[in-house]
Image (spheres, grey):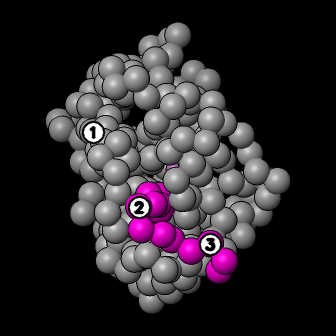
Amino acid sequence: MFGTSVSIKSEKEIELMRESCRLLTIVHKEMEEAIRPGMSTLEIDILGESVIRKLGCIPNFKNYNGYPASICVSVNDEVVHGIPNKKRILQEGDIVSLDAGLIYKGYHSDAARTHAVGQISPEARQLIDVTRQSFFEGIKYAKAGNHLNDICSAIDNYVTSYGYGIVSALCGHGIGTHLHEDPEIPNYTMKKRGIKLRPGMTLAIEPMINMGTGEVDWLDDDWTVVTRDGKLSAHYENTVLITEGEPEILTLY
Ligand code: MF3
Ligand code: CO
């Protein structure tokens, strides 16, 4: 990859990206408010998809490479891409990662949050907070003229200082008229500086962080990614616009 395939959005496209992302924050807010012990992960998917459709948008995850739902719901040791299931019931003390995206007038948005179900342990709380903060450490470097690895290594350094494991099997990505565009955005230091960041790039930056090691496995459903050691995992993702100045976090709410 030489950086030439990373799309630069026009002012008109940026407006559409902003709106796609704004609408996605509504979906996330509604899901977050609904979370409670006793709820099934399928109920979260049904709610999320209904909000997306009520907003006149399309769930971009549904049928993506055969993914069978609209919202990825990943509980505890599930890292990402958990498949909603009516038999999977959230329990007090669980942590649940919700990854959602939509298409508005052809433009994709993508964001993820990990939430507490009722009261959780201080260790789980810290994992969620450090995962979130690692995103903000990364985007301190999301500025035109910097290189991609400036973001990646800032995430890596912050997470590693807590002794957590970075999931290196999965990455963030460019986003726009497709859910996954170039560049690939690892959450660890690369051996190269990566592409130069330019105004008009829209990037989904998404640290996936494990309490233990960063090693993961795939369940037999071919989707659900789980920690190999069975320890907790958290996820935090926003769609971000590179500008001439400070980055714009389009999916913040
Ligand atoms: N945010 C996830 C990603 O960037 C979305 C996965 S879509 C799925 O990989 F359909 F594959 F689940
Ligand atoms: Co993503």
Of tags 1 and 2, the one toward the viewer is 2
Q: Kindly identify the amino acid type of the residue bearing the numbered disc 1.
A: Gln
Mark 3: secondary structure: loop
Q: Is residue 130 above or below residue 4?
A: below
Label 3 or label 1, whichever lies nearer to me, is 3
Residue at coordinates 32% horizontally, 63% vertically from top-left?
A: 119
Q: Which residue is mark 1?
A: 133
Q: Which residues are magenta?
A: 86-99
Q: Position of residue 194 (x, y in %)?
A: 48, 19
Q: Amino acid at mark 3?
A: Arg
**Where, by quadrant of the figure, is residue 247 drawn?**
top left
Q: Nearer the viewer, residue 119 or 105?
A: 119
> Would the CB of label 3 be found within 8 Å of ligand 1?
no
Residue neighbourhood size for the residue with mark 3, other residues' Cα within 10 Å, grouped as few (<14), some (14–19), many (≥20): some
**Residue 92 highlighted magenta (yes or no):** yes
Would residue 228 be found to the left or right of residue 54 on screen?
right
Q: Residue at x 65, y 80 (%)?
A: 86
Label 1 beta carbon within 8 A of ligand 2: no
| Disc 3 from disc 1: Cα separation | 29 Å
User: Quick check: 224 left or right of 160?
Assistant: right
Q: Which residue is mark 2?
A: 93
Residue 88: assigned label = 3
The answer to whether residue 13 shows anywhere in this view is no
- Specify the quadrant that holds the C terminus: bottom left
